[in-house]
């Protein structure tokens, strides 16, 4: 018997958007990690049917200083948040304000991540809020011809909002409300009229993604690297995964919302895979392929040759400079450093401890004797001994250069001591923002030095063989030579490992000691046997730090300096949770 046809009701279509109460929220924070950083400001606007129902906005005391770069971005200073309420009193007010509503945020994972972390930290259960991300909606309803990107400022200009985003929480929340209304108007042309339809629409795959699903057919479920290629064989994108089949299939579903990647999928005509023995081998191969082919849709790791170094020049009166190439020229190098800003901070910290000249002129004894060099302002205020005009002898200046070399080689105590004195003095004078700036300089130096020392220790080893327990009961093996992954393999469950280890060592790639004054400074076009990039060595070090990894063989001494920066990294990280630094030991 056939069931009678029944006409559906409006309720079957879901909750009409005009009847949904949205709470648009924006946060300002001390950094990008919900686990480590804190909220400095929260702003929220409640709207329904295009009408504003209420606002909530307040600064929040993060429990520590606001980093200078955050102050530069938002205008929020440590002094502004000192008297503000703490998160434990702001959070319940926000949860009550948003109760029963749909949360909206621009780049929702960021803001919601901080709110969830705050709930966990203060003992509140996270309510099951429906969440809408205006970034996801914008990527679906706006084309590249209309907006070059989906940043809030860009969308605000496009929709001509009355409120301009200013990196202040309430202003950005108000701007996001207007952007949301503009996006909802666009959704009408797609037949989207309910909350349920809107949430599904934002995550739905594009027609190109649906059409290209067959490219994932035949991809194996093993660790490896995958390469998307166009019809002419050009490599568009390189990625890696512990399960190639699962990862590649994800590119053709609604879970992949990155506009660049969706565009790449529309161009791709084939997916080529390279199976790897271990996850580490896949990670390293990905780095090497990206550096070699520089695929246009990859953003990171494309230019390892652009690493940044702090260099103490090899000349009669050495000075510190920031360079992008590590040469075998007798100079001392520190790094690689992640960014020019951090390199500047690290250089400033070293200058605070060692009175090296900061001028850029090339000084020689002959030039000084002829009176061809002139002292700068730093000499007049006592920040430089002025070797340029003979006030400081070559012998006295050589002592400063030797101290700087010792610091860069491993003994960071002079830099830490000098920074500690300045931080203590500024803190005692209640100049907290300046103390925080000094802390940031010290942190940049310690992190750069720790990274360089870890890489140097690995790059000096002619050979290291390590094993890690595999999920199936066997072992993963890695042979590392001068920091480069020379071979990777596996040992089956219940098999004797030694024959497999010996075979892997015998067939491993030949690698020569790296040239230059620091690890990771492999120049562009260098042969694979010349050594490893800094990124590759860090992949290897992360793998070696995993639980259960065992050293099978080590040729050479794997050590870090006794007074190096490695032991200070945790101390520096903990310092960001307090207004002042504890004494260094």
Image: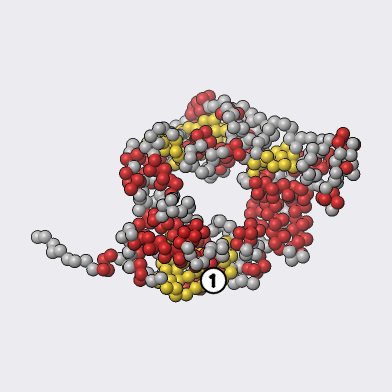
Closer to us: 541 or 554: 541
**Vertical order, 210 against 3 (above or below):** above
Q: Quadrant of residue 244?
A: top left
Q: How is the image coloured?
A: secondary structure
Q: Quadrant of residue 178?
A: bottom left
- Which residue occupies 48% across, 29% down? 500
Question: Which residue, as the protein is rendered here, is positioned at the far left?
Answer: 1
The secondary structure type at the circle numbered 1 is strand
Across and down, in percent, residue 313 comes to 75, 37
Visible in this render: residue 409? no
Across and down, in percent, residue 561 comes to 71, 41
- Which residue occupies 33% across, 36% down? 218
**Vertical order, 569 against 408 (above or below):** below
Q: Is residue 208 left or right of residue 474?
A: left
Residue at label 1?
57
Across and down, in percent, residue 365 comes to 86, 35
């Amino acid at each position: 018997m056939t069931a009678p046809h029944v006409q559906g009701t409006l309720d079957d279509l879901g909750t009409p958007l005009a009847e949904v109460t949205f709470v648009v929220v924006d946060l300002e924070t001390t950094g990008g990690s919900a686990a480590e950083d804190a909220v400095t400001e929260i702003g929220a606007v409640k709207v329904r049917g295009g009408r504003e129902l209420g606002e909530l906005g307040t600064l929040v005391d993060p429990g520590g200083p606001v980093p200078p770069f955050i102050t530069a971005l938002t205008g929020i200073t440590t002094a502004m948040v000192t008297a503000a309420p703490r998160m434990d009193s702001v959070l319940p007010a926000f949860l009550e304000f948003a109760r029963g509503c749909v949360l909206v945020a621009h780049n929702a994972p960021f803001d919601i991540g901080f709110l969830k972390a705050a709930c966990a930290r203060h003992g509140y259960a996270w309510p099951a809020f429906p969440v809408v991300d205006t970034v996801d909606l914008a990527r679906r309803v706006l084309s590249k011809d209309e907006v070059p990107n989906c940043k809030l400022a860009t969308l605000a200009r496009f929709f001509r909002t009355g409120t301009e985003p200013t990196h202040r929480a309430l202003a950005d929340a108000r701007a996001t409300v207007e952007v949301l209304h503009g996006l909802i108007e666009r959704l009408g042309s797609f037949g989207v009229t309910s909350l349920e339809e809107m949430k599904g629409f934002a995550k739905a795959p594009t027609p190109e993604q649906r059409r290209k699903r067959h490219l994932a057919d035949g991809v194996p479920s093993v660790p490896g690297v995958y390469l998307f290629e166009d019809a002419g064989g050009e490599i568009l994108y390189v990625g890696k995964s512990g399960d190639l089949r699962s990862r590649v299939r994800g590119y053709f579903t609604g879970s992949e919302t990155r506009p660049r990647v969706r565009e790449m999928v529309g161009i791709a005509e084939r997916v080529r895979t390279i199976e790897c023995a271990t996850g580490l081998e896949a990670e390293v191969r990905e780095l090497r392929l990206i550096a070699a082919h520089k695929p246009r849709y990859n953003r990171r790791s494309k230019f390892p040759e652009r690493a940044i170094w702090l260099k103490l020049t090899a000349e009669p009166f050495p000075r510190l400079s920031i360079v992008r190439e590590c040469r075998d020229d007798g100079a001392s190098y520190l790094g690689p450093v992640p960014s020019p800003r951090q390199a500047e901070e690290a250089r400033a910290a070293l200058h605070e401890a060692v009175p090296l000249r900061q001028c850029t002129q090339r000084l020689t004894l002959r030039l000084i004797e002829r009176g061809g060099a002139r002292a700068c302002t730093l000499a007049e205020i006592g920040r430089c001994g002025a070797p340029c005009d003979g006030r400081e002898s070559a012998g006295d200046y050589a002592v400063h250069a030797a101290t700087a070399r010792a610091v860069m080689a491993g003994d960071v105590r002079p830099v830490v001591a000098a920074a500690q004195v300045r931080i203590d003095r500024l803190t005692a004078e209640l100049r907290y923002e300046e103390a925080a700036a000094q802390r940031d300089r010290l942190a940049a130096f310690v992190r750069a030095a720790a990274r360089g020392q870890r890489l140097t220790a690995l790059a000096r080893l002619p050979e290291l063989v390590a094993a890690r327990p595999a999920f199936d009961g066997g072992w993963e093996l890695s042979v590392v030579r001068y920091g480069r992954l020379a071979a990777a393999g596996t040992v089956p469950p219940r098999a004797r490992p030694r024959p497999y280890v010996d075979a892997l060592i015998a067939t491993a790639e030949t690698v020569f000691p790296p040239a230059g004054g620091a690890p990771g400074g492999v120049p562009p076009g260098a042969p694979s046997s010349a050594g490893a990039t800094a990124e590759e060595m860090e992949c290897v070090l992360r793998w070696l730090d995993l639980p259960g990894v065992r050293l099978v063989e080590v040729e050479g001494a794997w050590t870090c300096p006794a007074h190096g920066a490695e032991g200070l990294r945790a101390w520096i990280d903990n310092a960001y949770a307090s207004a002042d630094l504890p004494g260094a030991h």
